[in-house]
Image (cartoon, helix red, strand yellow):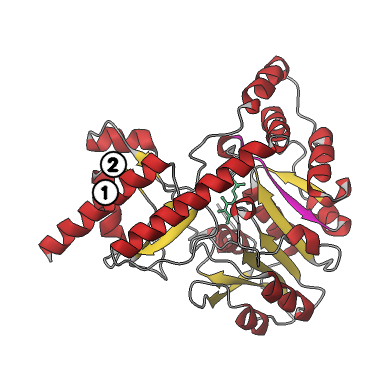
């Protein structure tokens, strides 16, 4: 066999542990998963009926260009229909961008640390990822600009940044966009945009008219609570969207996913309610971290990175034994875990487990 050389040593993605496996392995009856930034409130109650109505059509291929969903989403976002592309999660849009733009040896600039999917897809295409260290957990846009060369095809900005949860402001972002060469694609990943309450935050979609080299990624997996249905989207100028459409598989989203997404965007109250509860959860967790003398990055999505003052992998194992799954393994932050903001009771369970784990560790060392 002769695989592409760039994929031979590529690791297989290691997902967070499923709840059922943790229960079985550790003999626990109650496990809280705060590892994958899923919505603790599920999805809009309107989704069930929308899915049930689609069940009669499971044998029929979906609408490959998602015409009705596109129409409704364009109205919701205030863009034209030819500015939107859907994917099997926004993960797929990331893969399609890499597929459409990267040749072996091309360069692509991203933060270190950020969402790992940018680099893995660049690797698959043989592109070189230039990883620019975060400053205080935040994208260093000046340094990223300095890292752009005439071989740079795309720059990735994750806002809020996963895993640190920080944002760049609209002023910082537009200063960056004003200076970056127009032939470089700027991918602004706004998977958590709907959670943000900070007034300095940019709605990237409002910037598309001024910056034709910008594409914004959003998803139904996070605040809309449809992670299992795999549907996300990109918004950009028609010329950019067309290029990405040219490398898209014909039926990359399902009927069920499209129907659920349509029902979700119509339910503004659900989104507003989740945003409000999430903001309260952040406040509660921040207060508890301060009480425990732990430092954390300012969180703007539905997750917080907190420094647990111990090897994160150890804390991960301790918390797991106490029935709480979090995320560890961020190479730049070996003493930090990322925890999803859960419901009130999940957050309390996490804090009590964290406190117990910290005390146990103190007693040991
Ligand atoms: C969750 C997430 C996504 C995409 O999720 P999909 O389920 O594939 O839509 C994209 N970017 C970031 C930063 C994320 O955290």
325 vs 364, left or right, is: right
Asked if residue 80 is among those painted magenta in the image, a careful observer would answer no
At a point 64% along the width and 82% down the height, the residue shown is: 142
Q: Position of residue 241 (x, y in %)?
A: 82, 54
Numbered circle sitting on residue 353: 1
Is residue 260 shown above or below 145? above
How many C-alpha atoms fall within 10 Å of the one at disc 1: few (<14), some, or many (≥20)?
Answer: some
x 16%, y 56%: residue? 360
- Disc marking residue 112: none
Q: Nearer the viewer, mark 2 or mark 1?
A: 1
Residue at (83, 59) in percent of width and height: 240
The answer to whether any part of residue 92 appears in the image is: no
Residue stretch in magenta = 229-236
Q: Main secondary structure of the magenta part?
A: strand
Q: Which residue is mark 2?
A: 323
Front in this rendered view, residue 316 or 107: 316
| Extreme residue in the bottom direction | 146
- Taking 306 as reference, is 222 above or below it? above
Q: Secondary structure at mark 2?
A: loop
Q: Measured along the vertical axis of the image, is residue 333 above or below residue 65?
A: below
Image x and y of residue 251, in percent: 74, 36
Cα distance, mark 2 to mark 1? 8 Å
* 206 relative to 305 in the view: left or right: right
């Amino acid at each position: 066999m002769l695989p592409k050389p760039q994929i031979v040593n590529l690791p297989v993605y290691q997902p967070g542990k499923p709840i059922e496996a943790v229960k079985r392995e550790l003999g626990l009856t109650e496990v809280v998963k705060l590892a994958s930034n899923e919505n603790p409130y599920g999805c809009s109650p309107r989704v069930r009926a929308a899915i049930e109505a689609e069940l009669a059509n499971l044998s029929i291929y979906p609408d490959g260009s998602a015409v009705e969903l596109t129409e409704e989403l364009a109205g919701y976002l205030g863009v034209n229909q030819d500015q939107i592309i859907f994917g099997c999660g926004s993960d797929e849009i990331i893969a399609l961008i890499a597929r459409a733009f990267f040749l072996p040896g091309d360069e692509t600039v991203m933060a270190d640390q950020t969402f790992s999917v940018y680099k893995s897809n660049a690797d698959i295409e043989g592109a070189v990822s230039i990883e620019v260290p975060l400053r205080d957990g935040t994208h260093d846009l000046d340094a990223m600009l300095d890292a752009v060369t005439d071989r740079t095809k795309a720059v990735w900005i994750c806002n809020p940044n996963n895993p640190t949860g920080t944002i760049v402001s609209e002023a910082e972002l537009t200063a960056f966009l004003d200076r970056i060469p127009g032939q470089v694609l700027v991918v602004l990943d706004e998977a958590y945009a709907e959670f943000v309450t900070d007034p300095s935050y940019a709605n990237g979609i409002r910037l598309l008219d001024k910056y034709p080299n910008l594409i914004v990624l959003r998803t139904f997996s996070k605040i809309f609570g449809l992670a299992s249905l795999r549907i996300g989207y990109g918004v950009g100028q028609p010329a950019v969207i067309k290029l990405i459409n040219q490398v898209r598989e014909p039926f990359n989203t399902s009927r069920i996913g499209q129907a659920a997404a349509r029902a979700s965007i119509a339910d503004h109250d659900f989104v507003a309610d989740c945003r409000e509860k999430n903001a309260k959860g952040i406040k509660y967790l921040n207060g508890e971290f301060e009480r425990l003398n732990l430092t954390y990055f300012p969180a703007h999505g539905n997750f917080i990175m907190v420094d647990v003052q111990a090897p994160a992998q150890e804390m991960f194992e301790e918390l797991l034994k106490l029935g709480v799954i979090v995320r560890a393994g961020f190479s730049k932050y070996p003493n930090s875990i990322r925890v999803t903001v859960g419901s009130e009771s999940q957050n309390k369970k996490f804090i009590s487990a964290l406190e117990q784990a910290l005390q146990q560790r103190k007693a040991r060392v």
